Image (cartoon, rainbow, N blue to C red):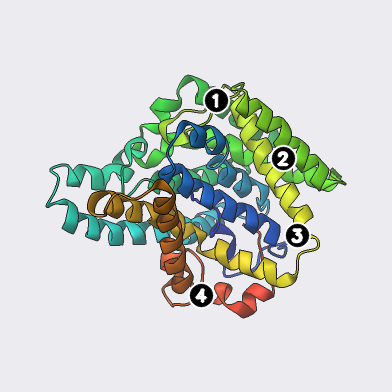
């Protein structure tokens, strides 16, 4: 991946309101949904073209969004609790559930079952099916916690550490990725969060978001399609072309947000509600689509890649939407049941994280 991280669920589960909470943005939820679709496509529609078009932005997007919605007033304790509820709790739930299915089925076929089961915990870089995306969750968790710790220090120190992260992404990316829980990738990835914070600070100065967003996307497309910048594979510690690939990933992420905001200005409220509900279920899609992919590859008949993509996307999302309506929603999706109810969705729950 990806992920999923996904960031889709992070903004929704705080029980107590935080200062300056803002209404949930349907435009940003649309970008999240697009990012999740891109993550699934990256795992199922495997080709050099897919790698070029998607890997340049689809995973960094979620780190950038975590910074874009950064809450400057949150305490370190609150950060740990919120990230645990929205990221680690559903990840651990699905580690147990998927792990049980995996053990029952895989022990009959392989002699590496236990090593692969421990993969996400022991070595994020080598997380294999059906745990492909779990590295992303821990990397996002630790990156957010690190930035929160840095937020307690003078701001120049924060930006300096982010700069060190960019340097380490070039000099030691694979070594950092080859660590338990992908914790080593935290320092390079915190740069994406810091750049997301900067993007949010710049947003009020942008009077024409559609034009600026389109320009960011157009310039980024030229750089990507001409091979000037290489795709990123953060899971493997490959951050592409030094600095430039990171800048392009952030530009695409910010550009998508700006264009989506412009599109949503005239969209009916019900469109925003539908997109938000889809976004609520998105983190579960990030965690569980590798299970569908593994089952299809191991036990299913050969199918066209397009059909494989559709199955890996639609089945987890349908299950996630059903899970949102249950008391187990917080454990399965990272979203509290009260938050994902229609009444709360229509009332635009707080989006501060």
User: Whole-percent x and y of residue 46?
Assistant: 42, 39
Measure the alpha-carbon separation of dots 4 and 1: 41 Å
Q: Earlier in the sequence, mark 3 or mark 1?
A: 1
Tell whether label 1 touches label 2 (CB within 8 Å): no
Could one spot residue 160 in this view of the protein? no
Q: Residue at x 70, y 57 (%)?
A: 27
What element does badge 3 sit on?
helix
Residue at the disc numbered 3:
264
Mark with earlier residue (3, 2): 2
Real-space Cα distance between discs 4 and 2? Answer: 32 Å
Provide residue 308's location: percent of width, then percent of height.
39, 52
What residue is disc 1 on? 230
- Label 3: how many Cα within 10 Å (few below 14, some 14–19, many 20+): some
Q: Which residue is mark 2?
A: 198
Answer few, some or many: residues within 10 Å of disc 2's Cα (few below 14, many 20 plus, some between 14 and 19). some
- Quarter of the image where the C terminus is located: bottom right
User: For the residue carrying disc 4, how many other residues have a C-alpha within 10 Å: few (<14), some (14-19), or many (20+)?
Assistant: some
Tag shown at residue 105: none
Residue 239 shows in the view: yes
Q: Say which element carries label 1.
A: loop
For the N terminus, which image quadrant?
top left
In this rendering, which labeled residue sits more in front, label 4 or label 1?
1
For the residue pair 181 and 107, the one nearer the viewer reads as 107
Q: Residues within 10 Å of mark 1 (few under 14, many from 20)?
A: many
Cα gap from disc 3 to disc 4, whole angstroms = 26 Å
Comparing labels 2 and 1, the label whose residue is closer to the camera: 1
Mark nearer the N terminus (4 vs 1): 1
Furthest-bottom residue in view? Answer: 343
């Amino acid at each position: 991946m990806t992920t999923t991280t996904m960031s889709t669920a992070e903004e929704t589960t705080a029980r107590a309101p935080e200062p300056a909470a803002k209404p949930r943005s349907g435009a940003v939820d649309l970008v999240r949904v697009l990012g999740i679709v891109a993550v699934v496509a990256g795992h199922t529609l495997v080709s050099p073209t897919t790698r070029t078009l998607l890997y340049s932005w689809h995973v960094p997007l979620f780190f950038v969004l975590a910074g874009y919605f950064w809450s400057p007033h949150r305490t370190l304790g609150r950060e740990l609790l919120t990230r645990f509820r929205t990221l680690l709790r559903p990840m651990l739930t699905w580690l147990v559930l998927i792990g049980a299915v995996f053990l029952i089925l895989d022990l009959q076929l392989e002699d590496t079952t236990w090593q692969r089961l421990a993969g996400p915990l022991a070595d994020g870089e080598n997380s294999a099916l059906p745990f492909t995306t779990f590295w992303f969750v821990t990397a996002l968790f630790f990156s957010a916690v690190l930035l929160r710790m840095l937020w307690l220090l003078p701001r120049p120190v924060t930006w300096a550490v982010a700069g060190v992260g960019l340097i380490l992404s070039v000099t030691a990316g694979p070594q950092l990725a080859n660590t338990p829980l992908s914790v080593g990738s935290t320092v390079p990835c915190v740069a994406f969060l810091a750049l997301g914070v900067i993007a949010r600070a710049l947003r009020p100065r942008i009077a024409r978001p559609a034009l600026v967003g389109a320009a960011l996307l157009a310039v980024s497309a030229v750089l990507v399609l001409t091979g000037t910048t290489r795709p990123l594979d953060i899971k493997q510690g490959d951050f592409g072309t030094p600095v430039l690939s990171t800048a392009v990933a952030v530009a695409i992420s910010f550009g998508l947000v700006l264009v989506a905001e412009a599109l949503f200005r005239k969209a009916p409220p019900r469109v925003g509600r539908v997109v938000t509900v889809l976004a609520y279920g998105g983190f579960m899609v990030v965690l569980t689509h590798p299970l569908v992919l593994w089952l299809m590859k191991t036990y299913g008949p050969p199918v066209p890649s397009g059909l494989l993509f559709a199955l890996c996307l639609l089945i987890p999302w349908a299950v996630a939407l059903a899970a949102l309506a249950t008391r187990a929603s917080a454990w399965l999706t990272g979203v509290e049941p009260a938050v994902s109810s229609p009444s709360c969705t229509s009332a635009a729950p707080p989006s501060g994280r």
